[in-house]
Amino acid sequence: MLTKKWLEDALARNYVIRIAFETRFAVLPLHLKKPKFCALDFGLNLRKPIPDLELTEEYIAGTLSFGGLTHYCKVPYDAIVGIEEDGAPAQVEQSRPLRKMPAGWRVIDGGKTDGEGERKPA
């Protein structure tokens, strides 16, 4: 399951963590709330540093830059549907109901996707 400890370990290795998630559960700028899914990068060595990167037992958060404008973003772990570390699918299990996910993202709860991105049990 995706945990604070897992994220801390990945960030300590200087990995860039890209998470795909359902936008309805996240705090985001309005232009990113319109699509059902979004992907954001978190890391300690991004080109534009995240000055207030926060990891809790429930979410990852921080002020990110979008086209030169900054916005505080907060993504609960339960909203995450896919994750990559340094550009490769991460080996993380997520225990929650199956949901739709963006095409091309790895299922992180042991399921498989059909051609439409619908997640199905393995």
Image (cartoon, grey):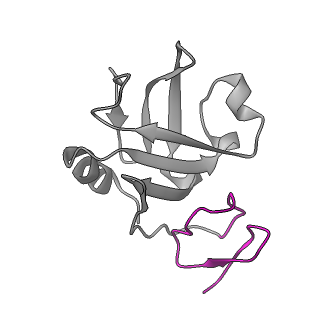
Q: Residue at x 30, y 57 (%)?
A: 6
* Image quadrant containing the C terminus: bottom right
Which secondary structure class fits the magenta region best?
Answer: loop
Q: Residue at x 67, y 41 (%)?
A: 23
Is residue 32 on the magenta stretch?
no
Q: Is residue 23 left or right of residue 92?
A: right
Q: Position of residue 39 (x, y in %)?
A: 57, 44
Quadrant hosting residue 43: top left
Quadrant hosting residue 84: bottom left
* Range covered by the magenta-colored residues: 98-122
Q: Position of residue 49 (x, y in %)?
A: 33, 23
Is residue 102 on the magenta stretch?
yes
Quadrant hosting residue 25: top right
Establish if 120 lies above or below 32. below
As drawn, which residue projects farthest toward the left?
12
Establish if 55 lies above or below 10. above
Q: How many marks?
A: 0
Q: Residue at x 55, y 67 (%)?
A: 106
User: Looking at this view, is 3 or 33 the one in front?
Assistant: 33
Q: Position of residue 52 (x, y in %)?
A: 34, 23
Q: Is residue 55 left or right of residue 70?
A: left
As drawn, which residue projects farthest toward the top?
69
Q: Residue at x 44, y 70 (%)?
A: 93
Q: Position of residue 103 (x, y in %)?
A: 69, 61
As drawn, which residue projects farthest toward the bottom?
122
* Image quadrant containing the N terminus: bottom left
